[in-house]
Structures are given as structure tokens and as C-alpha cells.
Image (tube, helix red, strand yellow):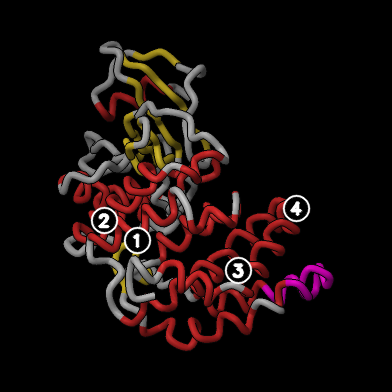
């Protein structure tokens, strides 16, 4: 396949392949991707999309353009000569994004970085505000977390009865959240927000990547997913370093008001079922066991999390 011909859709005439440059984010979000440098020294990431993916990616491109226009650091797509954010050529669909260089995220030490937490919290506040004017993703189906959890439990029951016993013991702790899930206030969310989906420049957010699951979600959905990823690195980190700094920043931005905030610890726990699904898909037994232990620890300590976070909002 002649990549140079594809790049003409974006007015790029000459290029060199840069296989030496690492691209952060999940490579599973597209069929293939190439890192390319044009004659001016600019570096780009070209993605070939899966069949039936292009309409969704076009809407994501439109939403990211609006967020970028509002000043948010997001990894955007470039419009092609065809007018949209997805170009069609030879029966395939393509997108082009700039390569944003960044710094390696130090794992697991990043959980101690309060400044990094403030950067994450500031981004979520800005997304919450700017997202109110972004409607391209309004038709994204809502994520039915209660149904998702129960379906996953049934799958695990038939395939891994031992693991099922550990997970089903967590389910009652989620009942308060699931009873109000459909009534929780929604806003535009990233959908998979965690520190590895951020390109870092020092302690600052250079760009947020991988918007594949963006759409209307409960207001604290992104924060719950993010802090859940912090806690699995070190459960004690939920009360020190990045986590409280992120919540403090969100509280100062007005995101932690309202009665729904008291379900935040439950949401953090509930979101871990999506990660358990990922470990099951990868057949990663070590992470399945770690996740199960972590989820049971969270379930036993929901009230404690509410107490330690109450200084930031209405938990």
C-alpha cells in the first residue's frame, strides 16, 4: 500500500517512516498505525481504521476539534482534503493526528505526585465545562454499569467458578449505586481516563489520548476510573499524593457538589469490573487475582473512603 498517496489527502507530499518513535495509547484501537515525518520535520501518526469504525471516529474528530478550540490539551485529528476527519481511499478509512512527544510516566511512583494529580483534576474540570457545548457524541449509548457487572458475573460463573465466588461477594456493596445509576447527572466524559492515556510533559498534561469510549457518562465517571487505577498500584495512594490533589482540584472547580457525589467510592469499585473484564480477555491470571483482592478491599472500605475524601466535597 502506497502511504505517500494516502498522505496526499492531507497535503503531505514527502515522508520518511519513523519506526524509532514510540506511540502511546492502545494499538488495538485501529487496524494499523504508522509514524511518519514530513519534509518540514513534523511528525504524524497515520491510522487505518477498522470497518464500520469511521462514522464514530468522524464524530470523535468533530468533538475533539471543539474541545481543542476551547483550549483543552487533546490529541486531535487533522481534516483531510475530503473535508472531514476521516479520509477514504482504496476501500479503507484513514485518520491523521500529530505526534505529541512526552515524558515517560514513572510507574508506580507517579501515585505520589500531587502536582500531577492537580493537573489531572484541572483537566477534568475544564472538560466538564467545555463539554457542555459539545454535542457530537450525545447519541453515544449510555454505559449500563449494573447490567455490565451482572453479565460479567454470569460469564465468570460458568468459566471460572473460583473467581466468581470472590467477585460475587462484592456485588452487594454496589447496590446503592446501581439503584440510582439511571438518575445520576451526566456530562461529556473521556470514557477511559487514566494516567497512561495522558501524554505528560513533566507534571503537566500535554495531551489526553484514546477518546474511543467518549460520550455522556455520570459526572464522576472519569475520576472514578482514574483513581481506581491509582489505587491498584498502591491502595494507600488513595489518601496521599496524586489522588487527594486531584480531588481537591476538582472540588475547587465545583465538580464535587451535589448528592450524587456520595456514590463516588461505589463507582470507583464498580468500574473495576471493566478492568477485570480486560484481564479475563487477556487471560492474565496474575492480574485477575490482584484485581479480585483489590475489589474486595475496596468493598470493605467504601465508608472509609467517603470519610477521607469528605474534605473535598459531598462524599
Q: In the rendered image, which residue does mark 3 sit on?
A: 298
The disc at residue 127 is 2
How far apart in space, not on screen, are marks 3 and 4 (Cα)? 23 Å
Q: Residue at coordinates 71% horizontally, 78% vertically from top-left? A: 168
Foreground pick, 58 / 115: 115
In the image, 161: left or right of 297? right
In the image, 150: left or right of 201? right
How far apart in space, not on screen, are marks 1 and 2 (Cα)? 8 Å
Q: Nearer the viewer, mark 2 or mark 3?
A: 3
How far apart in space, not on screen, are marks 4 and 1 (Cα)? 29 Å
* Of the image marks 2 and 3, the number of the one nearer the N terminus: 2
Q: Quadrant of residue 90?
A: top left
Q: In the rendered image, which residue does mark 4 sit on?
A: 283
Q: In the rendered image, which residue does mark 1 sit on?
A: 189
Q: Residue at coordinates 74% horizontally, 70% vertically from top-left? A: 156
Residue stretch rendered in magenta on the structure: 153-166
Amino acid at each position: 500500500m502506497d502511504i505517500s498517496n494516502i498522505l496526499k489527502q492531507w497535503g503531505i507530499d514527502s515522508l520518511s517512516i519513523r519506526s524509532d518513535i514510540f506511540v502511546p495509547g492502545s494499538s488495538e484501537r485501529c487496524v494499523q498505525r504508522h509514524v511518519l515525518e514530513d519534509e518540514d520535520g513534523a511528525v504524524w501518526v497515520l491510522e487505518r481504521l477498522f470497518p464500520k469504525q469511521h462514522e464514530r471516529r468522524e464524530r470523535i474528530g468533530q468533538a475533539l476539534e471543539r474541545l481543542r478550540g476551547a483550549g483543552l490539551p487533546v490529541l486531535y485529528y487533522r481534516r483531510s482534503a475530503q473535508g472531514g476527519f476521516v479520509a477514504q481511499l482504496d476501500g479503507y478509512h484513514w485518520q491523521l493526528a500529530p505526534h505529541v512527544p512526552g515524558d515517560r510516566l514513572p510507574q508506580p511512583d507517579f501515585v505520589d505526585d500531587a502536582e500531577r494529580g492537580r493537573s489531572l483534576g484541572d483537566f477534568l474540570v475544564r472538560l466538564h465545562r467545555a463539554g457542555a457545548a459539545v454535542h457530537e457524541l450525545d447519541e453515544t449509548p449510555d454505559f449500563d454499569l449494573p447490567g455490565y457487572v451482572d453479565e460479567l458475573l454470569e460469564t465468570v460463573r460458568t468459566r471460572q467458578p473460583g473467581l466468581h465466588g470472590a467477585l460475587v461477594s462484592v456485588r452487594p456493596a454496589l447496590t446503592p449505586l446501581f439503584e440510582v445509576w439511571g438518575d445520576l447527572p451526566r456530562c461529556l466524559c473521556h470514557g477511559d481516563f487514566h494516567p497512561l492515556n495522558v501524554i505528560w510533559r513533566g507534571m503537566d498534561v500535554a495531551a489526553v489520548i484514546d477518546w474511543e469510549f467518549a460520550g455522556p457518562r455520570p459526572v464522576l465517571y472519569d475520576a472514578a476510573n482514574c483513581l481506581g487505577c491509582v489505587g491498584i498500584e498502591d491502595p494507600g495512594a488513595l489518601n496521599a499524593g496524586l489522588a487527594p490533589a486531584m480531588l481537591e482540584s476538582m472540588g475547587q472547580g465545583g465538580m464535587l457538589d451535589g448528592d450524587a457525589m456520595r456514590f463516588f467510592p461505589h463507582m470507583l469499585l464498580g468500574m473495576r469490573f471493566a478492568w477485570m473484564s480486560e484481564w479475563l480477555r487477556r487471560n492474565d491470571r496474575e492480574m485477575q487475582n490482584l484485581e479480585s483482592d483489590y475489589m474486595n478491599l475496596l468493598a470493605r472500605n467504601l465508608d472509609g473512603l467517603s470519610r477521607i475524601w469528605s474534605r473535598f466535597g459531598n462524599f
